[in-house]
Image: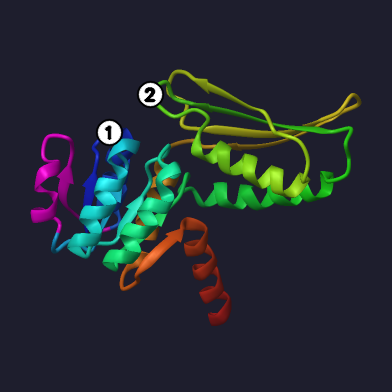
Amino acid sequence: MKLALFGFGQMARVAEAHARGAGHQIGAVFTSRNAADAARLLPGHDAAIDFSVPGAVLAHVEVCAGAGVPLVEGTTGWHGQEAAARRLVEDRGGALVHAANFSVGVHVFYRIVARAAELFRGLDAYDAFIEEAHHARKRDAPSGTALVLKDILLRGLARGDVPVASTRAGQIPGTHRVGFDSAGDQILLVHTARSREAFAAGAVLAARWLAGRRGMYAFADVLENILASERTVL
């Protein structure tokens, strides 16, 4: 594939290295300095990957849909604009995969937390909580992943609220803890990212999957489709 990148911070650089290592080509790289050239330079790319800033996401969705280039949206903190992004994709026949987190392991973690929430439903002696920690440069807090986990818990527990505590310090790639606490004991579920490589691998996987598709998808849809295809082959 020939990939374009939006943003060139640390996460985008990891995505670039992973893509090149997997045999893909990196074409245009767009930052605030050359964003105005995107409409002219995007055609000819097989997909674009965005790890930039929340305020630029809708512009990137629009320019990719206009150029007929599928977009993998890995930026966090923009999901209040998801309805507007969907309209752009649908009106212009674009293709978009989005996620708060492109780690395959995190999506398995979501399922584990969902099952735990079902088990704790009705056990009012236990209070759920979320703790998340990321590097000092991460701008949004709570993280998008923490917000997804909160939604999962609220649906599964069907009661109250779930507090989220955020830490921004040092070089932490990302840690999420989901706890169920009572006077007598505590159960703790933890996902820890060891590096940003897992996020990059998921983004490139999503870019490959988007080929030939139209519409707006969550990364969970990508994984479910891939798993279903493998089950069919088996």
> Is 220 in front, or is 19?
220
Provide residue 57's location: percent of width, then percent of height: 31, 44
Circle number at residue 9: 1
Circle nearer the N terminus (2, 1): 1
> Is 96 in front, or is 46?
96
**In the image, is 36 to the left or to the right of 177?**
left
Q: Is residue 35 magenta?
A: yes
Q: Which residues lie in the magenta part?
A: 23-42
Q: Is residue 73 magenta?
A: no
- How many dots with numbers? 2
Q: Quarter of the image for the C terminus: give it.
A: bottom right
Mark 2 element type? loop
Q: Against 90, is 28 above or below?
A: above
Splitting the image into 4 quarters, where does residue 56 fall?
A: top left
Evaluate if marks 2 and 1 touch, with contact meaning CB atoms under 8 Å apart: yes
Task: Look at 40% across and 43% down and name the residue there.
Answer: 197
Q: CA distance from mark 2 to mark 1?
A: 10 Å
Q: Type of residue at label 2?
A: Arg
Provide residue 206's location: percent of width, then percent of height: 39, 59
Circle number at residue 137: 2
Task: Look at 24% across and 37% down and name the residue there.
Answer: 8
